[in-house]
Image (cartoon, helix red, strand yellow):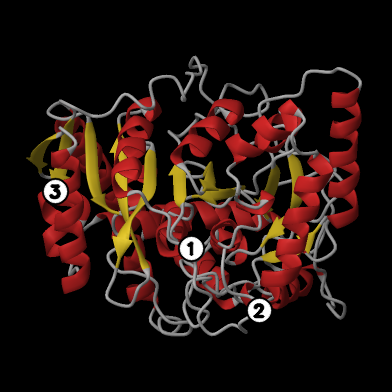
Amino acid sequence: MAELHELTAEQIAGAVTRGEASAVDVAQACLARIRRVDPSISAYLLVREADALDEAAELDRRRAAGEVLGPLAGVPVALKDNLSLSGGQVSCGSRVLEGYVSPYTATAVQRLIDAGAVMLGKTNLDEFAMGSSCENSAFHPTQNPWDLGMVPGGSSGGSAAAVAAATVPLALGSDTGGSVRQPAALCGVVGMKPTYGRVSRYGLVAFGSSLDQIGSLTRSVRDTALALGIMAGVDSRDTTSAAQPVDDYLDGIEAGIIGLRIGVVKEVHAEGLAADVQASWQSTLGTLRSLGAELVEVSIPNLRAAIAVYYVLANCEASANLARFDGVRYGHRAKDARDLRDLYLDSRSEGFGPEVKRRIMLGTFALSSGYYEAYYGRARGALEGLREQFAAAFRAVDVIATPTSPTGAFALGERVDDPLTMYLSDIFTVPANLVGLPGIAVPSGMDARALPLSLQLLGRPFGERTILRAARAFEAAVAWSAAPSFRGAPASVGGA
């Protein structure tokens, strides 16, 4: 029988609701797991041990009193540390927010709490969610539980590693260009970015406001569907949230994909997939075909340009959004500034790390007089072409398939000094953010180094039910049950 920390969110909620396990027992099991494995992977920035146990005990008290608990009763959750939780830190992995305590809770987080979830801690991330490896945190890098010499992906690397290592069954991240899906791929878990506006961004520290979405990381597609159904829906505090009815995402999720038209992007083969990744991709397509799907070749000619478009538009938005971190209102404040100009300059220079500075400067340059049309204007034009190409593809198919990442996990430090190669990690994930589409990453196999690979499925706007159904069918066929090996860790740490 599986131990409590190994259960899915759906299984935990059922066990707690039926009285087969207490919420305190579940929280204690996951906290013990964190103490055992997190010294090796450094997924967490903060563990809320006392608070989590108090919250779990309150759930048990309510159940004993006859109250009906929510669909996440007693489920431990980890939060990427750019999501607000009242009374707790929100560091964004940056020194510039040192000492900041949130006075409120993000809408998506509150909806999980209202459904019975227990917030176990805050996870590490690339500073201000800018990165693809979780090495840009101001505090420490996070290691991949499959191999401690490898990155877990980013920017939600802490959340992905926490779920892969079975410290929680559900974690939240943010996805601006693939920051949920890419680390999910590298850590062998399920990661989903909903349609833009499907989940409220209230309480998420902004990076690129037209691109950001809160997403989930889990060990099963059913858990992903469960979490999305709770978080989704309009929010008066976020004007970009969509007043679109929320589906029951678990309804029909086991229906299979016979007759589903799945688009295979022909430009994928031009993106330099390694031989083992290419072989795994062909096997993935064979599995989809064997499940009864109709595979249809589609073309997205602007796929190659998507990275350039993204790194212009996202950096322009980051330049504007991060202007608020100036040493005046909150966070790091330079001590020896002589005047207001020096206060701004010194506070930001001391507080921000190199990758954040790079992106602010690139965005500011692209928005500056004389360069606006050459960069921002052209990027917007290329984006419209990308939108039209995806719209045309979805007139022919129901779902679009690509690899989630062109490679498996890469070594810590391997791409730190090569930003372009690092950025190309997101070649298949950034289009969903640019166009506002839902996307899900689901484990598909292993590369030659026994590290996870992943299938990405993209859907039409608000087509989450379709891609969840397709992902669930693929997950069941692949029967992914591999657990991280913790290569490089002491023997006492390994195992699920």
Does label 2 or label 1 sit earlier along the sequence?
A: 1
Type of the residue with mark 2? Ser
Could you tell me which secondary element the residue under label 2 belongs to? loop
Q: How many marks?
A: 3
Q: Where is residue 457 in the image (x, y as percent from the top left)?
A: 30, 42
Circle 1: is it few (<14), some (14-19), or many (20+) Cα within 10 Å?
Answer: some
Residue marked by disc 3 = 286
Q: Is residue 334 left or right of residue 139?
A: right
> What's the residue at 47%, 66% (across, down)?
153
Residue marked by disc 2 = 492
Circle 3: is it few (<14), some (14-19), or many (20+) Cα within 10 Å?
Answer: few
Q: Where is residue 341 in the image (x, y as percent from the top left)?
A: 74, 70
Q: Are marks 2 and 1 in contact (CB under 8 Å)?
A: no
- Label placed on residue 305: none
Q: Quadrant of residue 193?
A: top left
Does label 1 or label 3 sit earlier along the sequence?
A: 3
Circle 2: is it few (<14), some (14-19), or many (20+) Cα within 10 Å?
Answer: few
> What's the residue at 68%, 46% (across, down)?
77
> Real-space Cα distance between discs 2 and 3?
39 Å
Among all residues in the image, which is located at the extreme front?
Answer: 1
> Real-space Cα distance between discs 2 and 1?
15 Å
Type of the residue with mark 1? Ala
63 up-or-down from 282: above or below: above
Q: Which of the two discs, 2 and 3, sits closer to the camera?
A: 2
- Looking at the rendered image, the quarter that the C terminus falls into is bottom right
Q: Nearer the viewer, residue 353 or 339?
A: 353
Q: In this view, does 314 lie to the left or right of 52?
A: left
Residue marked by disc 1 = 483
Could you tell me which secondary element the residue under label 3 belongs to? helix
Q: Where is residue 472 in the image (x, y as percent from the top left)?
A: 36, 37
Q: Which of the two discs, 1 and 3, sits closer to the camera?
A: 1
